[in-house]
Amino acid sequence: MKRVLASRSVLGSVLVMALVLASILLAAVLDSKDAGDATPPFNETLFKKLMSGQFTSIEDLVQDYEFQQSCWLFIVPPGDEPWTQPAGIAPFSPDGFPKEFIEALVPDERDGITVYPVIVCEDPVTRDRVVLNAKLDQVASAWPPKDYDPEWFLQELHPDLRDGKHSEGQVEFLRKLYDPSRIVLRYDLILEEDLIKYVWKRSIEAAVGEKSGGQMMLMDWGGGSVSNIQFVRIEPASNGVQVTIAYPDDYANDLDVFTCSDLIEFWWDWADTISVSGTNYVEWTDTGATGVSPRFYAAGNAQTNGVTDPDSDGLTWAREKYMYHTCPTNWDSDGDTLSDYEEVISLNTDPNNDDTNRPTAVMVFPPDGYRWVWMP
């Protein structure tokens, strides 16, 4: 049975009981460890780290959202739609929250552990910080900082944006791209007694992973099926940046990954072609990301077929969009009778410039082959 978080009128006794249970559980953990019990060791470091960020008020929650907002804006994907990211487990002390907030929380049981999911976002019109419960009902809000400018991040990233070098279209594109209201965070609020259960679960999983030779991996992404190619996780790695790319269950082709650092120019580099496995996701490390900021990622089907190559020119839709800026539905983007594939792969000419006409000379090199060369 799902339990409901007690209202503030009885929260005092509930909180005391929670602290008592937490103390008993933690003492039992320490005692078993000292006694040489075979039980896997409780991860005290993780427990203390999570508790150090415990929210004691709406203000704490909003401040954490604003901090994470500034971090996620560095890697926000192209577009202007909201971008929702998991903020993870968040311990909270109910005593400092309004009664209405506590009563509106919706519990979610996960393997015997109760969490209270909330969504925190920025209203794109009023710029208020808004908190929603699991039913998407507003349960709290806070004013934006005094003299708040929603373009603060864009101005820091491109201080010369309005110096006349960029078109109004480019400025508007970046203004929408880096609008802080695009960042939406999901928190799983949790009481201390359930946090102990959560850390126990993580401790046991880690121990099982060690016994299986490190084969087990704990992932922030919860898994599940997806209907398209998606980036579902990103994190720093010792040799770069690791991203997790999910794809539909029946997907069997390779993936092309592209990177760029400047969305104004929007010229992307091919980074790698990844072979998919029997799962519906793959982890890839971008070793070229060290010291590079910002870094943007895109992925697409690496095989050509009627869907990924609608104009049948031998170039995938993703490569035409990100690398060549050619038309994915027109095999000859510049209309000079040379296909886009011929120009970018065989001739190294500009597929968007009809001055690069059909070659008028042949250079034989190496002796067992030939290459068409355009001669003006």
Image (tube, helix red, strand yellow):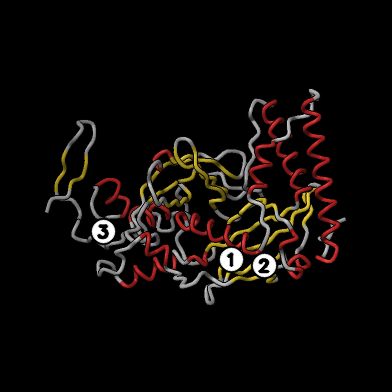
Q: Residue at x 83, y 59 (%)?
A: 12
Closer to the N terminus: mark 2 or mark 1? Answer: 1
Q: Are marks 3 and 2 in contact (CB under 8 Å)?
A: no
Image quarter for residue 85? bottom right
Of residue 145 and residue 303, the one placed in the foreground of this image is 145
Closer to the N terminus: mark 1 or mark 3? Answer: 1
Q: Residue at x 38, y 71 (%)?
A: 172
Residue at image mark 1:
121
Looking at this rendering, what residue extends furthest in the left direction? 376
Q: Residue at x 57, y 62 (%)?
A: 184
Image quarter for residue 82? bottom right
Q: Which mark is residue 132?
A: 2
Closer to the N terminus: mark 3 or mark 2? Answer: 2
Helix, strand or loop for disc 1: strand
Q: Which mark is residue 303?
A: none
Of residue 31 and residue 165, the one placed in the foreground of this image is 31
Amino acid residing under circle 1: Cys
Q: How many marks?
A: 3
Distance of mark 3 from mark 2, alpha carbons?
A: 56 Å
Residue at image mark 3:
337
Image quarter for residue 28? top right
Looking at this rendering, what residue extends furthest in the bottom direction? 126
Q: Quadrant of the C terminus?
A: bottom left
Return the x and y of residue 242 as percentages of the image width and height: 50, 42
Check the image and report above or below for 34 versus 303.
above
Q: Residues within 10 Å of mark 2 (few under 14, many from 20)?
A: many
Disc nearest the viewer among 1 and 3: 1
Distance of mark 2 from mark 1, alpha carbons?
A: 8 Å
Q: Are marks 2 and 1 in contact (CB under 8 Å)?
A: yes
